[in-house]
Image (cartoon, grey):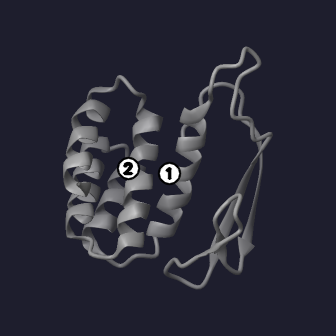
Amino acid sequence: MRITGPVPGYSIKYATHVTADPSGRTITVPGRSYLLITLRPAQAHTDSGSAKTARLTQAAGLLARVALYGVDQPDIQAGLAAWDAGLNEQALSHLLDAVRGAEDVELRDRLRAAIVGMFAELGEHHPLTARFRKRLAQALY
């Protein structure tokens, strides 16, 4: 995760299941071990009142990526490895191919969240964000 500005406090621990925040509804994800990453303070707005949605989108994207590490599909694993190596265009291409091939609705949603989180990390005006946002929309709809 790339964070601009002061780094918030955080905690990381193992969890027995994954839940949707704030509903608490259990979410089915592959694997048997999960990491719960909590950022504090969780603040959706700056002191001046502007939204910090990019940070929230980044955090949601990170959580989606963590869940995707347990999915044994070549495009997903290649995309995550490329992102971790800083090969952003290659990463987005692989993950977009995974979206196109995903039949499972929950997997498609995790892929979408991971990619949108990557867009937030790159920034709204980054050329890859502009190019791949359109491709993601076409793949999903």
Q: Is residue 59 left or right of residue 13?
A: left
Q: Residue furthest bottom?
A: 32
Give the residue at mark 2. Answer: 115
The residue nearer to you, when weighing 23 against 83, is 23
Residue at 50% across / 51% down in the picture?
A: 61
Is the residue 106 above or below the residue 44 in the image?
below
Hey, which quadrant is residue 32 in on the image?
Answer: bottom right
Task: Please name the residue shown 46% across and 75% down the image.
Answer: 70
Q: Quadrant of the N terminus?
A: top right
Badge 2 crowding class, 10 Å Cα cut-off, few under 14, some 14 to 19, many 20 or more, is many
Local secondary structure at mark 1: helix
Q: At 31% across and 58% down in the image, what residue appears?
A: 79
The amino acid on which the numbered mark 1 sits, given as a three-letter code, is Gly
From the viewer's perspective, is residue 28 above or below residue 101?
Answer: below
Asked if the residue under mark 1 is in contact with the one under mark 2, i.e. CB atoms within 8 Å, the reply is: yes
Q: Where does label 1 land, which residue?
A: 61
Mark 2 is on which residue type?
Ile
Instruction: Return the x and y of residue 134 as percentages of the image width and height.
Output: 22, 39
Quadrant of the rendered image containing residue 50:
top right
Residue 88 pos. (x, y %): 32, 43
Can residue 129 be seen in this snapshot?
yes
Q: Residue 135: image x %, image y %?
A: 20, 45
Would residue 8 appear left or right of 79 to someone viewing this image?
A: right
